[in-house]
Amino acid sequence: MNKLIKYTLTAIAAVSLLNCTGDFEDINTDPNGISNQSLTQMNNHIGGSFTPMFLNVFNVTPAWNYQLQQGLIGDVYSGYMTPPTPFAGNVNNMTYSLVDGWNGFPWGDAYGSVMPFALDVKNAVAVGGDESGVKFVHLATIIRVSAMHRVSDIYGPIRYTKFDDYTTTGEYDSQEVAYEAFFNELGAAIDGLEAFEGDAQFIPFDMSTLGGDISKWRKYANSLRLRLAMRIVKKNPALAKTQGELSLASNAGLLETMDMKINTGFSHPIATISGSWGDIRMSAEMESILKGFNDNRIEKYFNPAEDPSLAGAYKGIRMGIAIEAKGQYVNHSSIGSVIDGETIQWMTASEIWFLRAEAALRGWSNSGNAMSNYEAGIKASFAQHSVAGVDAYLVDNTSTPADFVDALNPVNNIAYASNPKIAFNASGTNEEKLEQIITQKWIAMFPDGQEAWSEFRRTGYPKIYPVVVNNSGGTIDTNIQIRRINFVSNEVNTNGTNVTTAIGYLNGPDNGGTRLWWDVAGSNF
């Protein structure tokens, strides 16, 4: 509770400082305290706005907010986790009856605690008149893109490029326009921050493991650009290659030796959702892949099942099945030590190596060798989690994902749809190599289900099991699976004209079966 109060007061202070009157100094200077001039010199009038942004790209408190922002959308649709709880009589997101009261949280968190505070930073710097303050604008922009590409990858069109103007703040961009803005803004930040390398003014406000180091923030922004470039590769391959090659050639470098995490000061929300509430468990896909591959990371990602009949095995749950009561599956494997501590993962070094591996398959300049990058990604993931056995793992050319067997109901049993191996198949087709790369990338990005869901939709890998119970009323195809979340009711009710325009930017109706702009069916090459 004390942490929550501290966070709230920080946010209030930021807003208050940015809405002060012209005679603030005359009426608010405390002769025994810190003057407004001193606050400005220490950049606290700017720095306070970073706290809510850091804490809401992934909302960290209360845990139920994270559960609705991430846990019951990306975390389940990615094939990472499955609830044992039959929420709303089992008519819910997991069975494709999309719950509007849940699905507005990614939108609300972004437009309540990210976009406005990024604007506050921009306005405070403009009012301050100090040209060096532009570094804070670039840093806020990087965080804003970190948040808003995730929001766009949930809904599609978003309010973005016109948000800073009061007269147009309700207007939407198509996802194509939003992504073009992401690239332009990241490029400007990467270039603009170069002059500030060695500047220490962001250190007091940086909640990330980058420690306020501007050179590391350039690496992160450049890595984010590479991620987004690959996201659009099937829709706009020329732009993807241009942006990807800019990242691969940039003097900013990439996060190849470090992970990007946020020191939140709060326990990871999944620790509460899984441990205290028992509302999330290992997925069927994680069981199939990790157990089939004899992957030692399973011991960090999950705990052995508590059900005595499972004899301490790791056991998952298939999503979208008939569940009558929580007690049926709650004693399956909970989430393991990967979520211990007070950090939230935004990006890992392993992801960068897998991006480079795919870039090499696609012939992008400066990407290196696909096999070497693939193996470096696996090694980075094993090292991140302090897991042994990577050398033997890399040369395993026999293990494949296992078929899934439900512990309670054989109607949920299902064969894994392909047989990718671990050892890189240098003689395979690009499609076969890509399945290996994305399958290992999927393992390594855990527990960031939103990013994993986006990659599944983009590539079709790894193979995610279809639901057994489909309550969508025909709007979501069981085999094609869910592609997006519909626009939230608050927007429809209060910003209806602009929502109607935004629906026109979609490739179909405003429901979960419509593909996003970058989500192109068919082969990846």
Image (cartoon, rainbow, N blue to C red):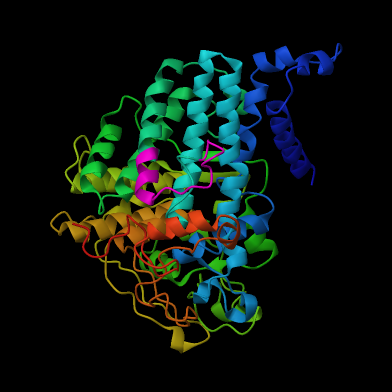
Query: Measured from the top left, where is residue 159 in percent x and y?
Result: 49, 47
Q: Looking at the image, is 139 positioned above or below residue 449? A: above
Residue 293's x, y, as percent?
35, 64
Residue depicted at 56% across the width and 33% down the height = 119
Instruction: Identify which residue is drawn at 16% across, 54% down.
Output: 426
Q: Is residue 137 magenta?
A: no
Location of residue 177 with respect to 470 vertically, above or below? above
Is residue 335 something that shows in the picture?
A: no
In the drawing, does residue 478 fall left or right of residue 366? Answer: right
**Residue 326 seen in the figure:** yes
Residue 126 position, x and y percent, is 56, 21
Which segment is the magenta one? 163-181
Magenta stretch mostly in which secondary structure? loop
In the picture, measured across the screen, residue 57 lies left or right of residue 467, that is: right
Q: Nearer the viewer, residue 341 or 179?
A: 179
Residue 264 occupies quadrant: top right
Q: Residue furthest left?
A: 427
Q: Is residue 173 magenta?
A: yes
Q: Going 40% across and 68% down the picture, which residue do you hit? A: 509
Residue 225 or residue 509, whichever sits in front: 509
Name the quadrant of the C terminus: bottom left
Q: Is residue 426 left or right of residue 126?
A: left
Number of marks present in the image shown:
0
